[in-house]
Image (tube, rainbow, N blue to C red):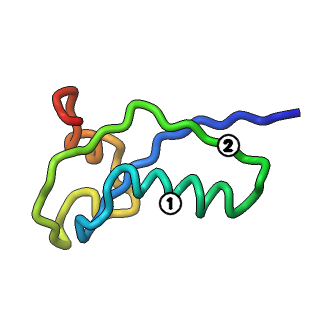
Amino acid sequence: MAQFYKMTLYVCDLEDDLSLKEIKTLIDERALSGVSVNAICRFSNEQTGKQIAWHDDVDINKLDCPISAWEKYFDSETT
């Protein structure tokens, strides 16, 4: 029997050196395919958010920050 999972993943590229395609490839090939040859994944609704100056006080630089802190860096106009 196959088990399905759905999740939202936010990624902050601190050095701005990865593309969305590279991130997806790393997740697919190194995370999922590295664990099992019996895992497949589908990416959808991808967005690239705003760029910000990173510093220690950025609101998402906390383990317990709410989803709303991440969401404010994305909007329907951002692709």
Where on the picture, by quarter, is residue 5? Answer: top right
What label sits on residue 73 in the rendered view? Answer: none
Q: What is the quadrant of the C terminus in the image?
A: top left
Crowdedness near tag 1: few (<14), some (14–19) or many (≥20) residues, C-alpha within 10 Å:
few
Location of mark 2 (residue): 40
Q: Is residue 50 left or right of residue 48?
A: left
Residue 37 in picture, x, y percent from top left: 77, 54
- What residue do we see at 76% from left, 57% from top? 36
Secondary structure beneath label 2? loop
Percent position (x, y) of residue 27?
Answer: 53, 56
Location of the N terminus by quadrant is top right
Tell me: 79 left or right of 34.
Answer: left
Residue found at the very far top of the displayed protein: 76
Q: Answer above or below: position of 30 versus 28.
A: below
Label 2 vs 1, first from the N-terminus: 1
Is residue 24 positioned above or below 62 on the image? above
Q: Position of residue 26 (x, y in %)?
A: 50, 60
Label 1 sits on residue: 26
View extreme (right): residue: 1
- What distance separates the C-alpha of mark 2 from that of mark 1? 13 Å
Q: Residue at x 31, y 56 (%)?
A: 19
Three-letter code for the amino acid on which mark 2 is drawn: Ile
Number of callouts in the render? Answer: 2
Residue closer to the observer: 55 or 20 = 20
Q: Quadrant of residue 47?
A: top left
Residue furthest toward the left?
A: 53
10 Å crowding of disc 2: few (<14), some (14-19), many (20+)? few
Amino acid type at image mark 1: Leu
Q: Is residue 4 left or right of residue 48?
A: right
Circle 1: element type: helix
